Amino acid sequence: MMRGRGGRMAPKALMILATGKQADQAPSAKAFTLIEIVLVLGLMAFAAAVVITNFASLADRGDSQTSEEILQAAVREARFVAASERTVTELRFDKESGCLLISSEASSGKTFPLGESFNQDGPANVLFYLVPPSEGLAPPADASRTRLETNVVKFAPDRSSSPFVVDIDTGSGTPTRLIFDPFSSLLITPK
């Protein structure tokens, strides 16, 4: 209704549309169309398929880790335990169980199994070697040629260690030599 000059409300004329509805009626509530619903369901199904495929491949990858990857994980864990517990942590290879063992004063330790070929009956072995320190301003010792064997590698609370090298002998050919940076879990490639 509209107000006129005298303050009275004049009735508003109703407008009829071609559809037969009055123009002043509220439009019907908006809703999703069938195409929009099918599109959203399709996108959700595609996203679920991608997630399931990636999860399945990640789960399968856990069974197929190489001994080098397991060793790198053990070194990272030993550095982490040393820093988090603020104590000296040791990493060693136990031939009887075929596992890498991490131990510290505060905890009993964690094991990293390497596989059947690394146990006492298998031909595989893991050997740790320390890299001798350089003297004065002499260049650092060639880590790829070190033969200073040790049973244990120790990690300080600041996550550092003595420079060390690991030989992984799988029993089938030449051992793989990994040279670790003493201040990180990174591998150093020989020159």
Image: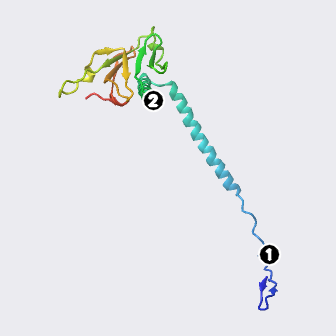
| Image quarter of residue 19 | bottom right
The secondary element bearing badge 2 is classed as helix
Where does label 2 land, which residue? 84
Q: How far apart are marks 1 and 2 (CA)?
A: 74 Å
Residue 22 marker? 1
User: Which circle's residue, 1 or 2, is located before the other in the chain?
Assistant: 1
For the residue marked with disc 1, what is the amino acid? Answer: Gln
Q: Position of residue 97 (x, y in %)?
A: 48, 12
| Image quarter of residue 168 | top left
Q: Position of residue 18 (x, y in %)?
A: 77, 76
Residue 155 marker? none
Q: Compared to 176, does 19 lie above or below?
A: below
For the residue marked with disc 2, what is the amino acid? Answer: Ser
Task: Say whether residue 119 is left or right of residue 151.
Answer: right
Which quarter of the rendering shows the N terminus?
Answer: bottom right
Q: Residue at x 28, y 21 (%)?
A: 131
